[in-house]
Image: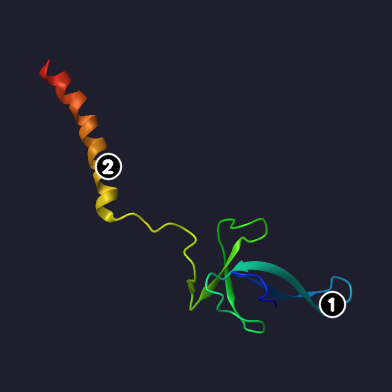
Amino acid sequence: MSDACDKTVIVRVERRVMHPVYKKFITRSKKYAAHDEENVFKTGQQVRIEECRPLSRRKRWIVLRDGVAVAASAPPPPAEEAVEKPAAARRARRAKPAAAAAQE
């Protein structure tokens, strides 16, 4: 709908619902403020949005480009080595008291 704000686009999501009494389909719409880090998207374009952490008071959505988030909303996952070292250290700490008890 709008790209007037910096790094933000206003996206209108439309859905069709059936009226409970008249059984006619009605178009309902809702507007969302979505984060567009590079100001790529313009008014009139169709975009995909995905829920993310709160970025401001109204922005809880991020615009996707080709199924991938344009801006990283979460930190990158840790490397495999960093994940394995703490587990190995915990195992070593647990094993030391048992080994010390066996020696005494």
Is 22 situated above or below 100? below
7 or 46, which lies in front?
7
Question: In this view of the protein, which residue sits in the foreground, 51 or 41?
Answer: 41
Which residue position holds label 1?
23
Q: Position of residue 93 (x, y in %)?
A: 23, 31
The numbered disc on residue 87 is 2
Residue 33 is tagged as: none
Residue 58: percent from the left, percent from the top?
67, 59
Q: In which quarter of the image is the N terminus?
A: bottom right
Residue placed at 49% from the left, 71% from the top? 70
Q: In this view, does 59 lie above or below 63?
A: above
The residue sitting at 84% across, 73% down in the picture is 19
Which SS class for mark 2?
A: helix
Q: Nearer the viewer, residue 92 or 24?
A: 92
Say which quadrant the C terminus sits in: top left
Judge whether 91 appears above or below 23 on screen: above
Here the colouring is rainbow
Q: Which amino acid does label 2 sit on?
A: Ala
The residue type indicated by label 1 comes to: Lys
Rendered location of residue 75, percent (x, y):
43, 57
Instruction: Of the two numbered discs 2 and 1 on the same chain, state the one appearing first in sequence.
Output: 1
Residue sitting farthest toward the right: 21
Q: Which residue does the image show at 72% across and 76% down from the upper left?
A: 14
Image-quadrant location for residue 44:
bottom right
In space, the residues marked 2 and 1 are separated at their CA atoms by 59 Å
